[in-house]
Image: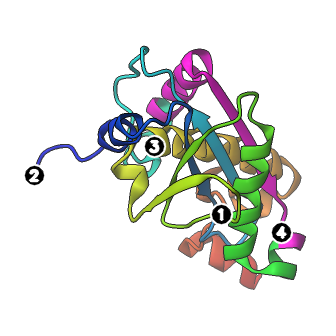
Amino acid sequence: MGRLCSTRYERQARQRGWLRIAGLDEAGRGSLFGPVVAAAVILNPRRRIVGLDDSKKLSAARRTELAERIRAHALAWAVAEIDAARIDAWNIYQASRQAMRAALEKLSITPDYLLLDAMSLDVPLEQKPLIHGDARSISIAAASILAKTARDTRMAEFDSEFPQYGLAHNKGYGTPDHLEALRV
C-alpha cells in the first residue's frame, strides 16, 4: 500500500472555496502523566514540506526537524495544553477538545475550514473529522508533529523534576518501567 498522508483533503477543501485550512491534532491522550497538548497549523499551499506524516510513525529526530520546518514555513501555527488537573476534572476527551479549541484561538490567522483527527469542535467553522487523520492529511500530520514535539519537551522538563518516573524516556505513557515506578 502506498503512502496515505497527502494533500487530498486540503485540495478538496480548496476546490470548494475554502482558503485558510487548519489541521488540528493532539498528543498525550493515552498518557498516565502530564498534559494533553494540541496544535493547529495552517500550511502554506505554495510551500511543500516533504515528509509530513503521523508523528507516531516518525523518529524523534525527524519530528524535531519537521517541527522546525513547519514553524518556519506554515502560514500560522499554535500550540496549547490542558494540564492534568483539568483532564481529571473534565475527562480526556473533553480536555483534548479544549486543547484543540485553545490552539485554534491562538492562531494568528483565522481559519475558514478545519481538518481534525477523529473529532469535531463546537465552533462556527466548516470542518471535516478524519479517522486516522494524522496519517491521511498533511495539515493534521503537521499539527500532530507540533503537538508531539511540544509535549515531549514538557515531559523532559517534568523528568528533571520527577526523575524516578523516567518521563524523558516513556513520556508518561504506561510502559512497564513507568508502571513499576508508580508502584514504588
- At x 60%, y 15%, the residue is 72
Within the image, what quadrant is residue 58 found in? top left
Query: Which label was assigned to residue 101?
Result: none
First of labels 4, 1 by sequence position: 4
Q: Nearer the viewer, mark 4 or mark 2?
A: 2
Q: Secondary structure at mark 4?
A: helix
State the CA–CA distance, disc 3 to disc 4.
Answer: 24 Å
Compared with residue 45, is residue 118 higher up or lower down, i.e. above or below? below
The residue drawn where x is 77% and y is 81% is: 184
**Residue kind at label 1, given as amino acid type:** Leu
Is 85 covered by the magenta stretch?
A: yes
In magenta stretch: residue 165: no
Please state the extent of the stretch shown in magenta in the rendering: 62-86
Label 3 vs 4, first from the N-terminus: 4
Kindly indicate the quadrant of the structure image that contains residue 131.
bottom left
In the rendered image, the vertical position of residue 30 relative to residue 18, given as above or below: below
Q: Please, is residue 126 above or below residue 84 in the view?
A: above
- Between 178 and 116, the one lying in front of the other is 116
Q: Nearer the viewer, mark 3 or mark 4?
A: 3
